[in-house]
Image: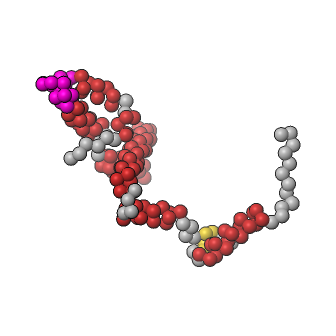
């Protein structure tokens, strides 16, 4: 399995110390290049162990926290609730937010790597990504003045054009005064 560096490691307070300790404690045998390679292999091994200990599997961790929060919700619904449980829910919500942030950063890093590998080519991945962006940016329905919604493309276009026409094209009696500037 290839070794991949995770940017989230740099944000952990213990990361640099762990690297320094694993580098210093390994002396190795042979010439300078063999000692250097031995140190790199030792650091890689230590990072892998440290990653599992500190971050574990973020997806599993997230699901465990969500399960614990659901249990707390059930306890509250059954009136089996105390200040201790309130604090526990607050702590679990904070832990969930932190886990989601780490998971998001990891996913974004992996997507950037995938984009760099495949995105510059005229590939299926490239076109799928562009289509997804285009679909996300598309206005699919519009709320009308009477609070109803329309999905008709011509109606959407006419309403948007009309809105901006009214906003910018008509003569406005309002004048902007810049006194004291």
Position of residue 100 measured from the top left corner of the image (x, y, whole percent) = 40, 47
Pinpoint residue 5: horizontal percent, then vertical percent: 31, 40
Quarter of the image holding residue 31? top left
The picture places residue 105, in percent across and down from the top left corner, at 40, 45
Viewer-side residue, 37 vs 91 = 37
Q: Is residue 37 above or below residue 63?
A: above
Query: Where is residue 61 shown, x and y percent of the image?
Result: 32, 46
Which residue is painted at 34% across and 53% down in the image?
Answer: 117
Q: Is residue 37 magenta?
A: yes
Q: Which residues are magenta?
A: 25-39
- Residue at (62%, 72%) from the top-left corner? 156
Left or right? Give the position of 179 relative to 62.
right
Q: Main secondary structure of the magenta part?
A: helix
The front one of 153 and 66 is 153
Front residue (pair 78, 67): 67
Q: Is residue 75 located in the magenta-colored stretch of the structure? A: no
Q: Is residue 43 above or below residue 80?
A: above
Residue 3: image quadrant is top left
- Position of 44 relative to 59 (above/below): above
Total residue callouts: 0
Whether residue 42 appears in this view of the structure is no
Identify the residue at image location x=69%, y=69%. Answer: 161
Residue 57 in view in this figure: yes
């Amino acid at each position: 399995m290839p070794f991949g560096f995770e940017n989230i490691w740099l944000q952990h307070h213990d990361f640099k110390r762990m690297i320094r300790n694993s580098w210093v404690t390994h002396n190795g045998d042979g010439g300078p290049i063999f000692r250097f390679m031995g140190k790199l292999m030792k650091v890689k091994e230590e990072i892998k162990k440290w990653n599992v200990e500190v971050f574990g599997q973020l997806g599993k961790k997230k699901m465990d926290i969500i399960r614990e929060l659901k249990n707390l919700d059930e306890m509250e619904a059954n009136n089996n609730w105390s200040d201790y449980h309130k604090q526990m829910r607050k702590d679990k919500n904070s832990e969930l937010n932190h886990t989601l942030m780490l998971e998001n950063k990891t996913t974004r890093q992996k997507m950037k790597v995938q984009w760099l590998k495949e995105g510059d080519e005229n590939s299926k991945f490239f076109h799928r990504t562009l289509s997804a962006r285009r679909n996300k940016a598309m206005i699919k329905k519009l709320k009308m003045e009477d609070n109803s919604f329309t999905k008709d493309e011509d109606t959407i276009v006419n309403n948007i054009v009309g809105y901006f026409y009214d906003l910018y094209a008509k003569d406005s009696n309002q004048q902007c005064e810049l006194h004291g500037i």
